[in-house]
Image (spheres, helix red, strand yellow):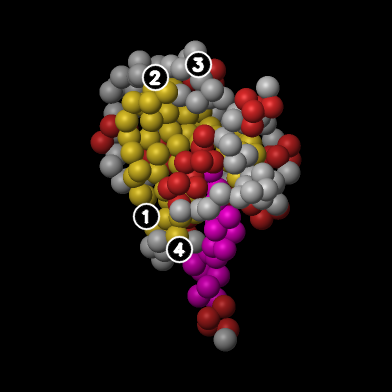
Amino acid sequence: MKGRSLRQALWHPHVNAVNAPPRLARWLTAGGSLTAMLREHSAAFRVQKLHQRPALCLNDEAAVIGLHRSSRVMEREVLLRCDNTPVVFGHTVVPMTATASDWPAFSSLGERSLGSTLFGDPRVRRGGLEFARLRASHPLAKRVRAAAGSPGADDADEAIMYARRCLYRRHNGLLLVTEVFLPSVLKLVKAGAIATFENRT
């Protein structure tokens, strides 16, 4: 039971439940488009597409999108990079029953931002945010380390990553977006703040 619990995450409707550091909690709870925020904190923002393909949904996300465990979904994973540094790992799943009319741009996103299409479409309804601590044994934590080149940690507490997820609806379609925040996101400084500092020195 212990091994199984470490491979799943407990998702909470309030960020206080995951005890994230205050600066990271501000990123986790930020409203609006994460893409827009990251652009404001970097000179060069990039979406690095890792893959987009059919896959098995994770155990702790199946019920959220109305599926049984081991159901197949269309999965998209990306790294969001600020000035070439990976800061957020994005994991999106869509049930295989979704149609092109539900999510017309999803199959052709390439390295464009999914967030830009979601927030630019008035027919998309956004659910509430949920938050979780991902231990080193969670599938997404393993994928983050592999994609971002982060070494594993012997101490499970040191390997904890913080994530949020949100369910989107459009017509009859469901789409679940999970964002895992890397420690490097805390080093970002808003572009305007940098300019102000430089002008004062």
Residue 58: x, y in percent? 50, 26
> Residue under circle 1?
46
Image position of 201 with respect to 196: above or below: below
- Left/right placement of residue 44 relative to residue 140 reads left
177 part of magenta stretch: no
Determine the image quadrant of residue 92: top left
Task: Check disc 2 and report its element: helix, strand or loop.
Answer: strand
Query: Can residue 185 be found in the magenta stretch?
Result: yes
Q: CA distance from mark 1 to mark 3?
A: 33 Å
Crowd band around label 1 with a 10 angstrom C-alpha radius: few (<14), some (14–19), many (20+): many
Residue with the mark numbered 3: 69
What is the span of residues highlighted in magenta in the rendered image? 180-196
The residues tagged by marks 1 and 2 sit, at their Cα atoms, a distance apart of: 28 Å
Q: Residues within 10 Å of mark 3 (few under 14, many from 20)?
A: some
Residue 52: x and y in percent read 33, 35
Q: Earlier in the sequence, mark 1 or mark 3?
A: 1
Residue at x 46% of width, y 53% of height: 149
Labelled pair 4, 3 in contact (Cβ < 8 Å): no
Q: In terms of secondary structure, where does tag 3 sit?
A: loop
Does dot 1 land on a helix, a strand or a loop?
A: strand
Q: CA distance from mark 4 to mark 2?
A: 36 Å
The residue at the far front in this view is 154
Badge 4 or badge 3: first in the primary sequence: 4
Question: Which amino acid does the dot numbered 3 rest on?
Answer: Arg
Pointer 2 residue? 72
**Label 2: how many Cα within 10 Å (few below 14, some 14–19, many 20+):** some
Whether tag 3 and tag 2 are in contact, CB under 8 A, the answer is: no
Q: Is residue 91 left or right of residue 107?
A: right
In which quarter of the view is residue 11 placed? top right
Residue 175 occupies which quadrant of the picture? top left
- Distance (Cα) linking label 3 and label 2: 9 Å
Looking at the image, which residue is at 42% across and 55% down? 81
